Amino acid sequence: MRLHEYYFENLGGKGALDKGGKLFKKMSDSFGSYEDWEKDFRAVGAMRGIGWGVLYQDSASGALCNCWINEHDVGHLAGCHPILILDVFEHAFMIDYGLKRPDYIAAFFKNIDWKAAEGRLK
Ligand SMILES: [Fe+2]
């Protein structure tokens, strides 16, 4: 339930990520650039199998990392807080996109509510 709450909360945005904001800076610090973060996150979401793509913030270091979660209740990283959630179970995309998961992920990126995601940063 909680992952779906995060997922729907971080959808419905209309604008791009603020390049002067703290999330953009954290992505650049952790991945080298925003573009490198996005490339990695898209690849995580397109991995074989069903599950979740999660951008986490490590509460100890403050660094960001992308992670694949297969089940709602298994595999979450200790001490990490979800910042952005992508649902990649079939029910999230099969009806509209069939096997074209990258097209679903592209649509997801066009509709991210970056303010909601940024608001989760510590
Ligand atoms: Fe779902």
Image (cartoon, rainbow, N blue to C red):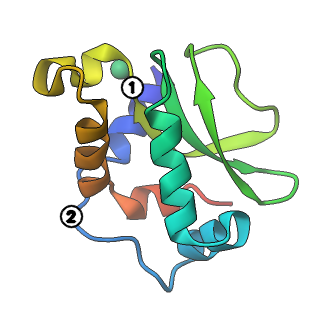
Residue 111, image x, y percentages: 24, 53
Which is nearer the N-term, disc 1 or disc 2? 2
Q: Is residue 76 left or right of residue 24?
A: right
Quarter of the view holding residue 13? bottom left
Residue at the limit of the structure toward the right, as seen here: 60
The residues bearing labels 1 and 2 have C-alpha atoms spaced at a distance of 21 Å
Name the residue beneath numbered marker 2: 14
* Residue 119 visible, this angle: no
> Contact (CB < 8 A) between labels 1 and 2?
no
Residue 30 position, x and y percent, is: 71, 64
At 26% from the left and 15% from the top, the residue drawn is: 91
| Amino acid type shown at disc 2 | Lys
Q: Residue furthest left?
A: 96
| Residue located at (23% from left, 29% from top) | 100
Please state which of residues 117 and 25 is positioned toward the viewer in this rendering.
Answer: 25
Secondary structure at numbered mark 2: loop
Which circle, 1 or 2, is nearer the viewer?
Answer: 1
Q: Please tell me which residue is depicted at 67% across the width and 43% down the height of the picture.
A: 81
Counting every numbered tag in the picture gives 2
Residue 61 visible from this viewpoint: yes
| Left or right of 18 in this view: 32 | right
- Residue for badge 1: 88
Q: Quadrant of ligand 1?
A: top left
Is 106 displayed left or right of 37 in the figure?
Answer: left
Which element carries disc 1, helix, strand or loop?
loop
